[in-house]
Each structure stands twice: as structure tokens, then as C-alpha cells.
Amino acid sequence: MKQSSQQSVRVIVELKELNNEDVMVFKMDEDENKYVIYMNRSSGQAEMKDVFTKLLELLMNNNVTVELVIADGYAKGLYKEVCSEYVSELNRELIQVKTSMEELLK
């Protein structure tokens, strides 16, 4: 199996306020603000799609794990819970997609 030659990539997702808006920042590139999901904007769904597309690109040659980090002083409990569940579900989905990709490549 080719998995042993693949790198493990950990993507940090920071939940924080940015310019008085609640955001999840996915740190996947040198430009750390390239993949930002604005929780309070209608553009959030499109931003999630962009993030997922980038994660799939990473998944092609790596094992990917997403880790949520909550910024110091961030106090919105509902967003903490929602984002924590979202990241957990995202990790489950990435594992499923990786398994399916490996099955197709056998």
C-alpha cells in the first residue's frame, strides 16, 4: 500500500474574531488568511466549498488531519460547539474520502 510513503499533514483551524466577525481560519498555505470562513456572512457556504476543495487537493498525496484551536478570549459558546462538531465531522469525512481514493487506486 502506498500510504506509508505519504506525509501526515495537520491543518490548524483557528476560531476567532476578525474585524468584529466570527471566522474559522484554515492555515493551509503560506498566506494564512487565504482560507477563511466568515460565520456571519452568506458567503460562508462558498468559503466552505473552497476550503474543502483545498483539503481534497492535500489529501491526494497526504494524510490530512484538521485540528481546531480556539483563540484566547473567544467567548461565544455556541460557535465553539458548532465548530468543534464541524471539525470532527470534517475529519471523519476526510478519512472516508481517503479510504475511497485508495480503494479506487488498487
Image: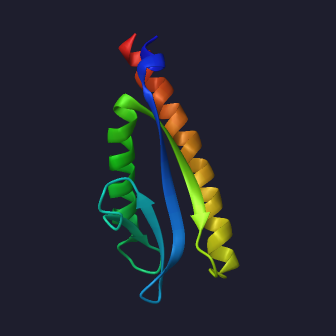
Total marks placed: 0
26 relative to 64, above or below = below
- Given residues 57 and 48, the one toward you in this image is 57
The percent position of residue 44, horizontal first and vertical second, equals: 40, 70
Q: Quadrant of the C terminus?
A: top left
106 relative to 41, above or below = above
**Residue shown at 63% from the left, 66% from the top:** 82
Structure colour scheme: rainbow
Drawn side of residue 60 relative to residue 26, left or right: left
- Given residues 14 and 21, the one toward you in this image is 14
Which quadrant would residue 7 be assigned to in this image? top left
- Given residues 57 and 49, the one toward you in this image is 57
The percent position of residue 18, horizontal first and vertical second, equals: 44, 82
User: Quick one: which residue is furthest to the bottom in this view?
Assistant: 20
Drawn side of residue 4 relative to residue 81, left or right: left
**Residue shown at 40% from the left, 35% from the top:** 59
**Residue shown at 62% from the left, 76% from the top:** 72
The percent position of residue 19, horizontal first and vertical second, equals: 41, 88
The percent position of residue 80, horizontal first and vertical second, equals: 65, 70
**Residue shown at 46% from the left, 25% from the top:** 100
- Given residues 59 and 104, the one toward you in this image is 59
